[in-house]
Amino acid sequence: MLGQIIAEAFTIHNILIMNLGIALGVIIGAMPGLSLTFAVTIVLTLTYGMDSLSGMYLLLGTYVGGMYGGSITAILINTPGTSNAAATVFDGYPLAQKGRAGDALRAALISSTIGGIFSAFVLMFLAPQVAKIVLMIGSPEYFALCVFGMLAAISTAGKNKLKGLISAMLGLLMSTVGLDQIYGSQRLMFGNYRLMGGLKVSTCMLGAYALTQVLFMAKKVYSEHKSGVAQPVPYVKSTLRIRDLLKYWKTLLRSSVIGTIIGAIPGTGGATSAMFCYNEARRASKHPEEFGQGALEGVVAAECGNNAVTGATLIPMLTLGIPGDSLTAIMLGALTMQGITPGSQLFNGENIWVYAIMGGMLIINLFMLLQGLLFSRGFANISRVPTVIMVPCIIAVCCMGGFAIGNTTFEVSLLIAFGLIGYLMRRFNFPIPPLTIGLVLGSLFETNLRRSLVLSDGSFAIFFTRPGSLIILIVAVLFAFLPEIKQLIAWIRKKSARRAS
């Protein structure tokens, strides 16, 4: 079977696709203002017409490359290319100001590779075990998992969970557009036959993320030179060797473990992992006062932590069909577009596709290291591309991608509509990830809700009498509202203490 996987997956064509994805991810990730979700969404438009394996390699290459690419501008111009590199700024830019830009970039590259490889190994060994457990899951448990995914998405809104809830409900509502799967009745079509098949997730995401981001970039395109953005630091060739980083092996191991755990939890991501790993590295350091002043260990912890989520985020997506964040929601949409349904059936002995994907994650991280070592200076120049050039190019790519999705201008209209919806949502601080995750999970949510109610003759008690679904629902509520629960407990204790005194 191993030989069959190697022969099927690692062809010259697929190896070139992996490297193309990595290069695109690094380039887009290094452009300030463009998110990693934007990068994957843009590249999604290139996967139409590809086979499922090549398409996934392109997306995963972009994902992994973009996660590292954000560190380039974080180190050189004090502006993280993506939110995942926010913690890299703390020590990366001070290192660059000290004339160690090359050392900082190489430390970020090697740490990212180590974190990504660790996460890929965890994916390879843990995902099949999770798939065996999934075989015991029924419709009520799947519905509970959908609720878990929705609540996890809502929790990304931070303190403003009401807006997160509204965004998620809007996504669920949009997922019902089209013909009802059971009765064939029209829902929210308003007489437009083009909506019979429902809203295409890839179109919605391309508009909500990519076009929305472009609108915000266009808004300030003429003011970027007047802003107080830090000036780029010249690239200085690195003298750092791999063995120089091995003295931080405890930090690398700790950040890899933390990042993998955080990545496997729906609703989290690279930014959360990087911050957590950075703070943990500073807490465990013998010289915490050096952090923020140009400590190489700070860059190592942040970059290893954010790349360690890349493989782990695929665990719930491949085994359960539950996207943990907006990135995996896009990949899930790409899979369904190829006719592949994630779940335990992917892990049967005859299906080499999923094992080729997991092996591909490992190879992609190694190719990222190779590209970074060879083209570090070229990647560093990406930070100098003017926004005024990027904006029209991205708009053209978005429109071409929207047309390619359905070969009709109606898809372009939907793309523009979702771009405006996304712009208004961000303008009024409504989070977009809950909307997109609600849109992706909507069909699974509705289908398993209906099946469960059929099994129970219309009784909702089935979700609370089955131990599996009950436990998942309790964990989902605790996970989503943990800060509020802690505040409530603290308030009760304070109240009790006042009464006792």
Image (cartoon, rainbow, N blue to C red):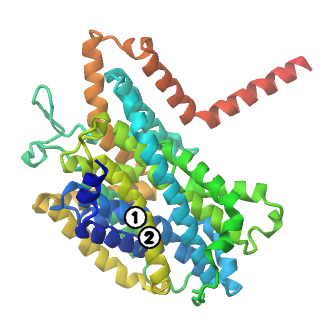
Q: Disc count in the image?
A: 2
Residue 414, quarter of picture:
bottom left
Decide if residue 33 is in sight here. no
Q: Is residue 36 above or below residue 152?
A: below
In this rendering, would 35 be left or right of 89? left
Of 375 and 126, the residue lying toward us: 126
Q: In this view, does 473 lie above or below 148?
A: above
Decide if residue 306 is in sight here. yes
User: Could you tell me which quadrant the C terminus lies in?
Assistant: top right
Callout 1, which amino acid?
Answer: Ile
For label 2, the residue is 368
For label 1, the residue is 364
In this rendering, would 216 be left or right of 397? right
Residues at marks 2 and 1 touching, judged by CB atoms closer than 8 Å: yes
Q: Is residue 368 above or below residue 426?
A: below
Residue 167 in the image: state x and y as whole percent. 40, 44
Residue 247 in the image: state x and y as whole percent. 71, 66
At horizontal 43% and vertical 77% (from top left) the residue drawn is 371
At horizontal 31% and vertical 51% (from top left) the residue drawn is 2
Task: Classify 10 Å Cα crowding around label 2: few (below 14), some (14-19), many (20 and above).
Answer: many
At horizontal 28% and vertical 29% (from top left) the residue drawn is 446
Residue 330 in the image: state x and y as whole percent. 32, 53
Q: Is mark 1 on a helix, strand or loop?
A: helix
Q: Is mark 2 on a helix, strand or loop?
A: helix
Q: Which mark is residue 40?
A: none
Q: In this view, does 278 lie above or below 370?
A: above
Residue 25 in the image: state x and y as whole percent. 39, 69
Callout 2, which amino acid?
Answer: Met
Residue 360, quarter of picture:
bottom left
